[in-house]
Image (cartoon, grey):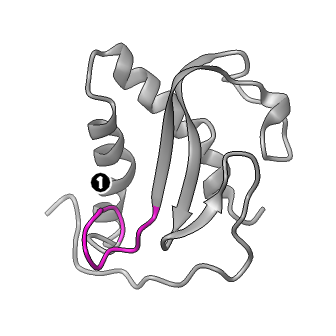
Amino acid sequence: MPYDHLIRLETLLPAFFTGAVAQGLDAAAPCAAQLSERPAKFFGLWPQKGAIQVGADADLAVLTPGVFRWDSAQAHDALNWSPYDGRQFSARVRRTYLGGQLAWDGADIQAHAGQGRYVRRGTSAWFR
């Protein structure tokens, strides 16, 4: 399925955010570090990916805090099943942007095939 990374945001980011809130953390900081910055460094894409700074790609997720119950029947994948079905999250993904362009409007995928671009692996690595 194209844009399956957008689909994973439906549960991964809210679940991680919810766990961070439950630990009493400022949830945005560990979400950004562990779900964006660290993977970008691991795959050698830092700082073009995984950072909010001048020259970076502007791939962003916007969350709405609140109490949201996950309903697998409303998922945007072909499964309509999830181990998170019925689970309560502390946030939901409101919008996502890829390269500064709206990719998810909170209800439907707005990105289209071919919209992305290849990013060559750089020299960054989390293990150095």
Q: Position of residue 112 (x, y in %)?
A: 73, 74
In the figure, 96 relative to 69: above or below?
Answer: below
Q: How many marks?
A: 1
Judged left or right of residue 120, residue 6 is: right
Judged left or right of residue 125, residue 101 is: right
Q: Quadrant of the C terminus?
A: bottom left
Is 33 in front, or is 97?
97
Q: Position of residue 20 (x, y in %)?
A: 35, 24
The three-letter code of the residue at mark 1 reads Arg
Q: Position of residue 8 (x, y in %)?
A: 62, 46
Identify residue for label 1: 38
**Predominant secondary structure, magenta span:** loop
Q: Residue at x 36, y 69 (%)?
A: 49
Q: Residue at x 51, y 34 (%)?
A: 64
In the figure, 74 relative to 23: above or below?
Answer: below
Q: Quadrant of the N terminus?
A: bottom right
Q: Position of residue 48 (x, y in %)?
A: 32, 75
Is 95 in front, or is 123?
95
In the figure, 24 relative to 125: above or below?
Answer: above
- Whether residue 53 is in magenta: the answer is yes
- Whether residue 104 is in magenta: the answer is no
Judged left or right of residue 90, residue 58 is: left
Q: Residue at x 53, y 62 (%)?
A: 97
In the figure, 103 relative to 118: above or below?
Answer: above
* Mark 1 neighbour class, 10 Å CA radius: few under 14, some 14 to 19, many 20 or more: some
The image quarter containing residue 27 is: top left
Residue at disc 1, secondary structure: helix
Q: Which stretch appears magenta?
A: 49-59
Q: Residue at x 58, y 50 (%)?
A: 95
Judged left or right of residue 71, residue 31 is: left
Q: Outermost residue, left direction?
A: 128
The image quarter containing residue 119 is: bottom left
